[in-house]
Image (cartoon, coloured by chain):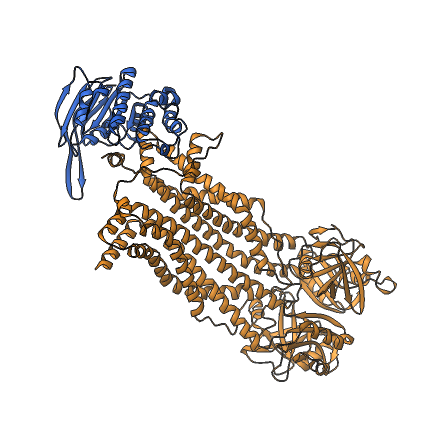
Amino acid sequence: MSLQLESVRKGYTVGSVKVTALSDVTLDVPTGEFVIILGPSGSGKTTLLNLIGGLEAADGGQIRVDGEDITRLPEAGLMRYRRFKVGLVFQFFNLIPSLTALENVALAAQLVNSQQRDPREALEWVGLGDRLDHYPGQLSGGQQQRVAIARALSKNPALVLCDEPTGSLDYQTGRDVLSLMRRLNREHRQTFVIVTHNANIAQMADRVVRLRDGRVMDVTLNPSPVEPQDLDW
Amino acid sequence: MRTSVLLRKLIGDMRFNRRGFLAVWLTFAVGLTFYNATYPGGRNFVASVGRFWDQTHLADLWFDLDSAPANVVESVRAIEGVRAASGRLALDLGLERGGSAPVVTVRLISLPESEADVNNMVVVEGRLPAAGDEIALAQSFAQAQGIALGDTLSLVGGADGAAWPVRVAGFAASGEYLIGSRSPLQPFPTLSTFGVGYAPYAALVDLAGVDAETINNIGLILTSDADVNTVRAAVTEVLRPYGLRLILDRHQQPAVATLKANMDSNTQIGLIMSLIFLFGSGAIMGVLLARQVDSERRAIGTLRALGYSRAEVLAYYLAFALIIAVTGVIVATPIGYLITWPILGFFQTGIVGGPIPSLSNPPNAAFILFGASTGLALALLAAALPARRAATTDPGLALRPPTPAGIGSVARVHVPGLSLSGRQAVRNLLRVPVRTLSTVLGVVCGLAIIVVAFAIWDTIDYNFNAYYRSIQYDFIVTTGQLTPVDTLRDQVAGIDGVTGVETGLIAPVTVALADRMYTAVGIVLDDAQTFHSFDSLRGAPALSSAGVWIGHNLARTLGADVGDVLTASAAGITQQVQVVGVVKQVLGAPLYIPMSLFSQWTPFGVRPANQAYVRADPARRLEVQRALSDLPGVIGVEDWQSTIADIQRVAAFNGNFAYIFLGFGMFLTFVVLFNTISASLYERHNELAIMRMQGFSRGEIRSLVTWETSIAVLLGLLIGILPTLLLVDYIVQLYNTDVAGNVTAIYPPTWIAAVAILVLTALAAQVLPLRSVYAVNMGDVSKSVSV
């Protein structure tokens, strides 16, 4: 899935103060690319991810996904977009605590009957074939994040958006999770957009977008990405 | 300073969460208002009636006789245990108002020469009758009949057969006829057909055609240490030679029985309803504060880190309950008291049919304090658990980011065959069992109250409408003397316009079973009678010479059932009779004896009667009624259809409470579910937002929440059935007295309606909480779940 952002703007009103979160962001992401968006806290990374994911509405500009401008979609259209095209992974996993690993994945997969992947298979991809009936509270942080990735991938989305996916994981687990993502990206040609403030991760990306104060400072293409297992931070 | 800052925070918190607190406050205030409106007012009503009975020297025992010399009262007064006794002459006559008005029955009671020691009366308007052509009438009867002071009326049915013109000199009230009912068989006011009047003794003697110094009714008051059974037995011995017709003690006296049944039950119901509401408000207060404590985890940690003590944090959260309770008391107490006035007016009109002379309704400090302190205690108790949890929060832990929520082992249940949504709903309900229990209890309470509302209507219909529809005649004709069945039937059947007639014999019968004894009304009916369509509750379905049927009130009072052998005594004859059936008889405590059995006890198989049940051509009812009144020996013609209408009107009065119950049940269910669903969705705010981010539609989220609500409602319904049945039966039986008793009825549509109302109420309760989920800002949540 390709992404084109053109002059995207987003602001908030906090009390009586207007805050600009994103200003004139323009970006092109080809299908199947592994993109990392870097920036310090408050740079607008998560806002950008939310706009791409259809979680928030932009104040201006266009966000074209495979040529369709999602900023013009009504609520029902955005819901279908999130359901069929987007997979989301968060820093704190956000699994449903009352469902097992398999059920968490199935909950998302059942939304997209025709395109769903077998939830068991999705969990086996992420190495949790032996933890199907475990509840989130019975899994480690890394395992929970892998369930969250399986959940996102079970819908077979064209676009996977990850917000600080290693932010609450230890170093080794973080590297494992990134390896998994990279592998899935290569195997399934899904576009991955990962937001992080960890600059060291950027070495594994095909494309690195640097944000500061809501503006794109630069976009770097990486001809020879580093394998996640070789990353160090 | 610290206190004022905390107070500002507290007020701010309440404003922020105003919907939830308003729901709790309203539930609390409604419960307390209901208590203050019903219980103290009801007790004041009972106390007022009690004062009036004291003031009018209400008897402990009544004896109806054929006739006796007045000096027999001296013999009765001399019996040990009798404190006071009065004799009088009472006569049932027809009262004609002229024009096309039907003849109604008036029970004319002789006035004593001075104030009576027993069963006195008071004049409430006008004056006492001074001459033989004057009478005083019971005020409620006069009002119902549209009779004014100074009106001239005619008494018919006297000994000489002539109409006796009388002028209404005054309106009176007496304790024994506070409810203007004819007999223990009809312990409800039937003011359309029956009333009480008072006339000078000499006039009664002339009307009755008896010798001077004759009486036929004695009332007596016992000393405080007397045993009523012992005195009754001794007095019975003295009066036996004078044709003892009926003995009543206070429990059987219609005014006492009916007022006691209505007032005791209604005040009791008021108390039950108030407690249900106060418990309901306590439950949702607990849920609301638990949610408040959860959401303020960091704030509590900050307060504790700043140096606020556990006691201060505890007091802070208890203050929520205190504010709700204190403001609730301040508002509910005066409003409740103000509502007592229309309620007492409602009671007077509905039960008594007119004003009670000694009614007073002062605010009762003891009852008000009881209600306020109970409400306050329940509110503080409900707040105690969440407040304690807040106070014992470790500040170090509270200030850290929250760890992802886990679930207890109880919520990890696996229900085979259930869809994923169903499993999720079940486990969500088990995540916070206490809250789910509150929801379920809310449904149980709602079900109980709503079914009680419908069951009151069903029971009234089953006992008063369906029952009376099954008794198919227009008039009851009563003769002063026993008449052969055939003679009476022929006399009545000979009147133009009469389309059907059956006869009966009615007389007091003393029945005994083991050590229990009771003066019942014996009714002898032809085995082949068709006018009374009895509803057999147990035993034989039709009259036969095998034994007797008893009304269910008599069965309850005596503890008798099918197969028991009773000892029945009347007019000096004692027989052993077997109970072959128990029939529904909502009013009165009768013993039905088939004529084929009764004629075995009489000399030569004589078949006497003193009542005729008459059907009339609808176009000639008035004409027939007058002709029946003119028959020789007839002392009363009761317009049975009017009597039924009166009885149904009084019964319907209690049906009005059903509307209140229905509204309260729906309100309580709504606020409980609203609060618990709000708390549940609030707690899972992020979880549901994440589902929305994944592409779940509003409808799918609504479906999940509806699953949860439905399961809780279903659980509540299943758990609630038994307590509901018990509560319905308890409330219906509250109205029981010796001479009145409902058979509990819940028609099948009631359950369907109650379930439908509960489900709709539950669905309505989730609308607002769901709207807050729909309105969630996914962008904000997305940022809050990453740092």
Horizontal side of B720 relative to B592 (left or right) equals left
Percent of width and height locating residue B472: 69, 54
Q: Residue furthest right?
A: B604
Q: Residue furthest bottom?
A: B114
Q: Colour of chain B?
A: orange
* Image position of B450 with respect to B557: above or below: above
* Image position of B734 with respect to A87: above or below: below
Percent of width and height locating residue B93: 68, 71
Q: Which chain is blue?
A: A
Judge whether residue A113 can be spotted in this image.
Answer: no
Judge whether residue A142 can be spotted in this image.
Answer: yes
* Image position of B99 with respect to B321: above or below: below
Identify the image quadrant of the C terminus of chain B: top left
* Image position of B320 with respect to A173: above or below: below
Percent of width and height locating residue B590: 70, 61
Percent of width and height locating residue B514: 74, 63
Identify the image quadrant of the N terminus of chain B: bottom left
